[in-house]
Amino acid sequence: MTVTRFAPSPNGPLHWGHAYSAIVAHDLARAAGGRFLLRIEDIDGPRNRPELAEEFRKDLAWLGLEWDEVPAQGTRLARYEEALEKLGSLGVLYKCTCTRAEIAAAASETGPEGPVYPGTCKTREVPPDAPAALRMDLSKALALTGPLCWHDEIAGEQTVDPAGLGDPVLRRKDLPASYHLAVTVDDAADGVTLVTRGLDLFHATPVHRVLQTLLGLPVPRWHHHPLLLDAEARKLAKRRGSPALADHREAGEDGPAWAARLRRGEWPIGISLGKPHI
Ligand code: GLU
């Protein structure tokens, strides 16, 4: 049975890009006679605005979608801790005290998420009480897993290639888990068989694939859909003025009619669909 999800972070209102993502996931689930889940990804520390979760539900209902809601990330901290203990016992974690500025200054490569971490803390002693993130040593991890593949429904069969990734953070200095760890643990806990999300997260998937093998979790399929872009061909973002769905909803516009237009590929004014894969 296909189980897919929409997993928004309540750090800003939903916009048309989120609406598209939710509709794609919802329709993939319905077409397969499966389940469509909503999961609120609320562990983003100070950027988290709990009141937005209820707005998200209103937006999805306004679009005419139906979903099953699974527990928010904030309720699952013990699972993340357990996963980190397991990874620690495999010897693939190390503490990192580097700041963003230090990483930017030391990096010699730039990847999809910015400067690639050059491994500064891998070989240095970190004082036990220094505030530290936990990173996964990818070369050690891949030595344990061996070569890995994953399947994207649009881009096809992919192999995990560590080049350009850098050692990912699994626990942040200020948070009990990083996006990579939380999303991997949660998708498994929620029985997700098809991870539907935007193409901007395509480059994150190899990290999740490695974690699944190390943690003994089931391996889903992925569907990375193209992104909606603004008039300057940039990903939509509230901070760049993309309108909030809530504004349209509160203005009394017809949500299901908007959803029908998005399904037909008729985009709101000034918005277009980006390229289908990386
Ligand atoms: N919470 C993430 C976001 O809002 C999406 C995570 C995912 O779909 O894997 O960008």
Image: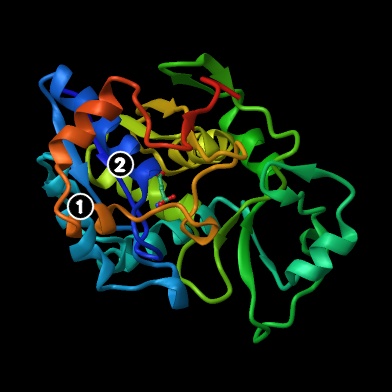
Residue 118 against residue 266 in the figure, above or below: below
Q: Quadrant of residue 176?
A: bottom left
Q: Nearer the viewer, residue 274 or 136?
A: 274
**Number of callouts in the render?**
2
Name the residue carrying label 1: 59
**Quadrant showing the N terminus:** top left
Name the residue carrying label 2: 19
Circles 2 and 1 in contact, beta carbons < 8 Å: yes
Q: Nearer the viewer, residue 197 or 1?
A: 197
Q: Nearer the viewer, residue 243 or 2?
A: 243
Q: Nearer the viewer, residue 119 or 180?
A: 180
Residue 9 against residue 78 in the figure, above or below: above
Is 94 displayed left or right of 263 in the figure?
right
- Give coordinates of residue 56: x percent, y percent: 23, 57
Q: Residues within 10 Å of mark 2 (few under 14, many from 20)?
A: many
Identify which residue is drawn at 74% across, 42% down: 111
Is 140 displayed left or right of 180 in the figure?
right
Give the label on residue 39, or none: none
| Figure coloring | rainbow
Identify which residue is drawn at 21% across, 62% down: 55
